[in-house]
Structures are given as structure tokens and as C-alpha cells.
Image: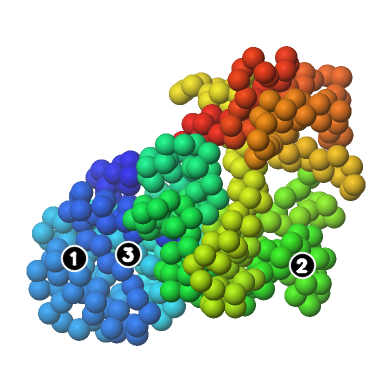
Amino acid sequence: MGRLDGLAAKRRGGLGVVWGRRRVGKSRLLLEWCRKHRGLYTVADRSSASIQRGYFARAAAEAIRGFDGVVYPDWRTLLGRLAAEARACGWRGPLVLDELPYWVETSPELPSVLQHWVDNDAAEAGLTVVVAGSAQAMMQGLVLDASAPLFGRAAELIEMKPLAAGHLPDALGVADPVEAVRAYSVWGGIPRYWELAADVRGGLDEAVDRLVLDPMGPLHLEPDRLLMEELPPAVTIRPLLDAIGFGAHRLTEIAGRIGQPATSLGRALARLQGMGLIERQLPYGESEKSSKRACYRIHDPFFRFWFKTVAPHRALLAAARPSSRRALWHRLCGALVAETWEDLCRQCVPRLDVAGSAAGRGGCAPWSVAGRYWHGNGPEWDVVARSVDGARLLVGEVKWGGGDPEGAVRAATRDLAGKGVPPISGLDPRGVDIVRVVFMAGAPPRAAIPAGTHVVDARQVLAALR
């Protein structure tokens, strides 16, 4: 909210743009910000343009008395009067136009109208204006594309992303870091899902069943709804998510699974990446331009969970009793949690020091962004990262379950030593110090950790991801 507060404090006002996937908390943030500054919040729906202007005028009447007393024939007239009335009464906003893509859907001329209005009438009135939306492809096209009318006008560009995993324990009241990782593997970083889960008594299993697995649960069809609400709707590219959820990760595998040529999937895959739902992974150190070794994974934890548990078992879940639904979840959750744990271990690396504890506030994180390394049928490294000065190389092994943590850390240490150093292009292993790290949800006693090995547990990972 601090960046929005700074925008509101500018004497001549200005334009802000907020975007991000649905349920991430944009509207809640903007509502709270408007209340704080006594601003005006308006939100579009999918009605006709004239009805939308009527709703807008009614909302604006809360700040400018009598504004809804006339019918506005077009957006230029409405916005022009709004700026004139605001200037006359000394009202400077903020004015929030939420779900802008819905207005643009019925009024394609609106971006150009807004451009002229922001540059002239709104600037003269000193208005602070924020436009927001959840249809990410359209929002980025309206603001970030160099040919877009609003390109270069915004004083603040804010992409709201899911919350980091380290905030989940406080939000859900989960004291055990291992349980917090399990919860994050289902709900991801979406505040709305956290709110729903926090209202369910009985722990994670009960919340998963009541909210998602139960056909009457509020999140049972959540991915379908989210894809439908995109502009344009993204339901036509859902088969790619199904294919990846089934285990097809390479481009040719995905194409074969859905029966389309690989050359036709580039735009759909790029859109899913832009929505934050999938990620394109390359072996650590590989050029981004490479395509031969790239693989695709569902990146969002909730979507990954849903496409592993709900999508392929809809018929079973429709007829199953709660006990059968939970049995399905228990059978699948181990692999899902382990995959999420591995993701979190890579994410936290830039905020860890050599010993594996969270970097101090204001300190310099010694590691660059981490990845994983694989090549053909050769060995794989779960976590690889170079220090920012290039003098050290972190190689890590990720472990989730197991009843003998002492034995597991010794085995992981042997595995790391046996694999040596990944053959990263341009890396001379003789010129770097190797730092071996074992990531374990529950670490063994310090005395049991082999010399030369660092162990990072779930508490440390979550502390870093705050």
C-alpha cells in the first residue's frame, strides 16, 4: 500500500496500474486504500456500456453530489464532467476503476479516451487515478505494450503476485513449519484460499475435502471459473494444463497428448506462463533461447494440486463418500507436497547465507537465483546456484519424508559427493568452492550432520520466504 500512498500524495495526482491473477487480493487492497484516503472505488461488470456508465455515475455520486442525475451518452462526456466537478469542489481522488477489461470489452474506444483524459482533464484537476484488472493478458496489452494508448502514462505499475509461503503460518495459525509446507502445497499464496481454509475446523485434510474434493465445495471447479473469467476466456487452453498435470512436460509430449502439432502451442503456453499458472524450466545455466531441453510444469500450487487430484478423478469424487475422497488425497499428497517443498527450497536460496539460515535484514544475499540441473539419463541436482561473486557453487539435495532424518542426511550427503559438480556450460569446477546443502523438512540433531554439509529445514525456508 505504500506505493499507492505515495501516488496519492503527489500534488498533481497521477495514474497507477494494478494487475494480477484473480483471488490475489487486488480489490481488497484497493478498497482499503480508498477508505484510507476517502476515495471513490468503482468496479465494472459485464453489462452493456450504457448500464456500466449508469453504475459508474451512481458510484461517483457518493463523492460528487448529483453526478448521477443525468444520462451520459459516452465515456468522454462522463469523464470530462467528473474532472470538471472534481476540480470545482477540490476533490482529488483517489479514483479506482477496477476490472477495467470489462469496460473495454463493451467500449473498445475507452483506452484512447482514458489516455486523453489522463493527459489533460484529470491532470488539470490533480486527480489520482488507478485502473486495475484481473484479465492479465488484456491488462498487460492495455498498459505495457508500446503501442497501447496508456503506455508510459503510469506513475506506478504494480503487479500483485501470490503471497510468499512464509506468511502462511501466521495467516492460518499453523505453528508447525512442516504442516505449513503441506498447507502451502494446496493453497499456494492466494489470500482468498487462505481465508476459506482458516474458517474450516479440523485441519488440512478437512479443509481439502470440504473446500475442494467435495463436489459442492466452493473451490471444486475453481480453475474452470478462473479460466472462463479471463478476457478473452482461456478455457480453450485448459487441455494443456490437463496434459501437464498428467505428466507430459516436454513440448512434444504435450502436443502428442492433446493431438495438436507442437508448432501451434507456443502462444497458448506463453499465455499460461503470463498468467502465472505454468513455468518453462531449463537446466541451470542453459540459455533461455534453448528449446530442446525445456520442460513445462504447473507452477501454481493450487492448480498443480487440482490437476492431480480433482481433474482426473471427477467421476470418482462425484459418487464417493468423504472417507473415499480423503483416501484419494492421502494417496496423492506425498508427491504433491514433495514437489512443492522442492520449489520452496529453490525459491529461498537467494535469501540464505552460507550456513543455510535466513539472511539478516538489510544483508547481502550471497546466492543468485537457483535452478535445477539435468541432462538426459545422467544425474540430477535438485538445487544449483552460484554466489553473486561467482566464487562459490551451491549444490543441493532435497528430501521431504522419511522416518530416519540422520540416515537421510548421510545418504543425501553421499549422493551429492558422488554426483560431483553439474557440467554447467562455462563453469570450471576447479575455480569455484563447492557448498553442499541438504534441504530436509525436519533436520536431524546438529551433531549428526556430516562435516562440510549444511542442512536447511522447513523453519529456515519459511523464515527466508517472508
User: Residue 452, percent across and down?
Assistant: 73, 16
In the rendering, which numbered label is found on residue 254? 2
User: Residue 176, percent across and down?
Assistant: 46, 37
In the rendering, which numbered label is found on residue 84? 1
Residue at position x 65%, y 39% from top? 400
Q: Nearer the viewer, residue 394 or 447?
A: 447
The kind of residue tagged 1 is Ala
**Mark 1 residue element:** helix
In the rendering, which numbered label is found on residue 97? 3
Q: Can you say which quadrant of the picture contains the N terminus?
A: top left
* Distance CA(mark 1)–CA(mark 3): 18 Å
Labels 1 and 2: the sequence-earlier one: 1
* Distance CA(mark 1)–CA(mark 2): 55 Å
The kind of residue tagged 2 is Ile
* Distance CA(mark 2)–CA(mark 3): 39 Å
Please say whether residue 435 is visible from this viewpoint. yes
